[in-house]
Image (cartoon, grey):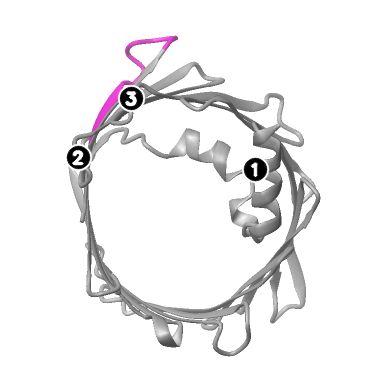
Amino acid sequence: MFLARFRRLIILTMTPPSYADLGKAARDLFNKGHNIGNIKLDITNKTGYNKEYEIKTSATHDLSKEVLGTNFDFKYKVQEYGVTFTESLNSNNTLKSVFEITDQLSKGLKVTLEGLYSFKDESRKANLKTEYVKPNLKVNSNLSLLGAPILDTSAVTEYKDLLIGVQAIADVSKSEVKSTNVTISRVLPQFVLTAFLNNGNVIGGSIFHKPSSTVDLGVQVNYKVGDENATYGLAAKYDVSRDLYVKGKINNSSDVVVSATHKLNNEISLTGSSQFSLLSASNGKNKIGFGIEYSV
């Protein structure tokens, strides 16, 4: 009874998620916390009186390709004006600049101007993004400004314990709709059930279940019309203690991934991961990975 009342309170006080975040709880069980085939280091530092300065550095070494990739981010927030500046530079010599303004042009409206420049080939990209939030509605759009203008628009509305989302991607220059997607998610105290239909030919769904405060379970299923077989997977997370949790997942190809994350203190976390196949030990799918996260 308490969980149900608490969940209803959350639903009433929170805005719907973006379309891309529908079913996110189940996807995170499969995708987050696994560093397969690489060694990864993440460092985050927030400074300033109101933590308005944020510096993030990440480095990833691919063990099979022996390639090192790095990324450096600097973010500055001017909270009284609802403005955020972000500059990013990666090892591919790509510079990304982001300017965000929130609740200044209109209450609930965030406008983002994003630009990318490659020092290698001097290519440029620019996008104009908007997000409009109401108590039971969230609308997002992304318009590419250089080259052929592609408009990606989505909306998510909430009705009782249902989240209903639609997305359309269109080529503005040709007045052509390239893709239409629909997702429905039902949010219950211990379950999140999600189903989607992408462009009329990809059907899928996911289930996120929290049977206790220390256990998370997830299921994903995808089927493309015309294919003989569906793809599916199972995932789980178990909080051994406040400082240690383990995660595991298996797919329809019998590939297994197991990871453990240990929080040494409030700033440092260590992650170790292993991937192996239940069918063969010599199919090249056996990999390991390590991660270090440092945040102050």
Magenta-span inclusion, residue 286 = yes
**Range drawn in magenta:** 278-290
Q: Tell me if mark 2 has few (under 14), some (14-19) or many (20+) residues whose alpha carbon lies within 10 angstroms of its own.
A: few
Q: Name the residue under label 1.
A: 6
Expressed as whole percent of the image width and height from the top left, the position of residue 96 reads 34, 74
Residue situated in front as seen by the camera: 43 or 58: 43
**Left or right of residue 49, residue 33 in this image:** right
Task: Where is residue 184? Give x, y as percent.
Answer: 76, 46
Look at the image and tell me in which quarter the N terminus lies: top right
Instruction: Name the amino acid, label 1.
Output: Phe
Where residue 67 appears, as percent x and y from the top left, is 20, 47
SS for callout 1: helix
Residue 107, located in which quarter of the rendered image? bottom right
Badge 3 crowding class, 10 Å Cα cut-off, few under 14, some 14 to 19, many 20 or more, is few
**Where's residue 50, x and y in %?**
30, 73
Q: Mark 2 points at which residue?
A: 265
In front: mark 2 or mark 1? Answer: 1
What secondary structure is marked by label 2?
Answer: loop
Whether the magenta-drawn stretch holds residue 15 is answered as no
Marks 2 and 1 sit apart, C-alpha to C-alpha, by: 30 Å
User: Which residue in the protein does label 3 denote?
Assistant: 241
Identify residue type, mark 2: Asn
The reply to whether dot 3 and dot 1 touch (C-beta < 8 Å) is no
Q: In this view, does 168 lie to the left or right of 232?
A: right
- Image point 52% across, 19% down: which residue? 253
Q: In which quarter of the image is residue 111?
A: bottom right
Q: Nearer the viewer, residue 93 or 191?
A: 191
